Image (spheres, rainbow, N blue to C red):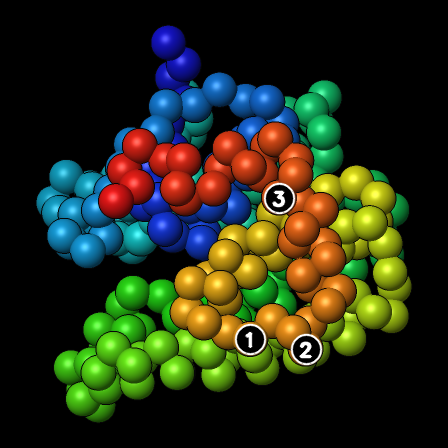
Amino acid sequence: MTDRVLYGYFRSSAAYRVRIALNLKALDYRYQPINLLKGEQRSAEYLAINPHGLVPLLDDGGVRIAQSLAICEYLDEAYPDTPRLLPAEPAARARVRALALAIAADIHPLQNTRVGKYLQTEYGKDEEGKAEWIRHWIRTGFDALEKQLAESPSRYAAGDEPTLADVCLLPQVFSARRFGVDLAPYPNIVRVADELEHLQAFAEAHPSRQPDAM
């Protein structure tokens, strides 16, 4: 049995990214669900290993790392003989990082569970109000991302092999569909997502295929 453990939640975009990365690198892991809706991320047991109370968290044989992009870069550096998520060439590497961060730092944080709860408790937003907030910020990010993909067309987000940009892109498209974002204005994003959905590493990481899926 592997001593590599991924703490996550099936519908978390950030945990989805790490599942994809682990699959791309063919690294075995044990999945430990943390139910965000039940508040398990705030339990004393979980906070003892991740004080931020967020998912994902990777425990790689005692090496504990939070934050999905940090985990992905760790996997690239710790397992260099597996398929790389970041290109070696500096300009290509920077472009992949920029695309990944446009999603992971600019879009995703505005749609996560704790932001939704704050909108509800402090500003009285109902479920539809929260959903429209999420749709607004996804559309804002996708408007720019679509232009970037159109400027440098390739099979995937940043080339003809999957990279960290794709690891972030597909989970964000899943979220966009979940919240009812009209994707018609984003043909390049949809085209890349469709390509990725046919890859086994991405398909197996889909939320619906996780043991805690409800």
Three-letter amino acid code of the residue under disc 1 = Asp
Q: Which mark is residue 83?
A: none
Q: Label for residue 182?
A: 1
Q: State left or right for residue 192 relative to residue 49.
A: right
Q: Helix or strand or loop: what does disc 3 sit on?
A: helix
Query: Under tag 1, what secondary structure?
Result: loop
Mark 1 and mark 3: Cα distance apart in space: 19 Å
| Marks 2 and 1 in Cβ contact (< 8 Å) | yes
* Pointer 1 or 3: first along the chain: 1
For label 3, the residue is 197
Tell me if mark 1 has few (under 14), some (14-19) or many (20+) residues whose alpha carbon lies within 10 angstroms of its own: few
Residue 30 appears anywhere in the view: yes
Task: Kindly identify the residue that appears in the image at 48 percent across and 83 percent down.
Answer: 136
Q: CA distance from mark 3 to mark 2?
A: 20 Å
Q: Give the amino acid at mark 3.
A: Glu
**Image label count:** 3
Q: Is residue 165 left or right of residue 129?
A: right
Please tell me which residue is depicted at 29% across the width and 65% down the height of the picture: 113
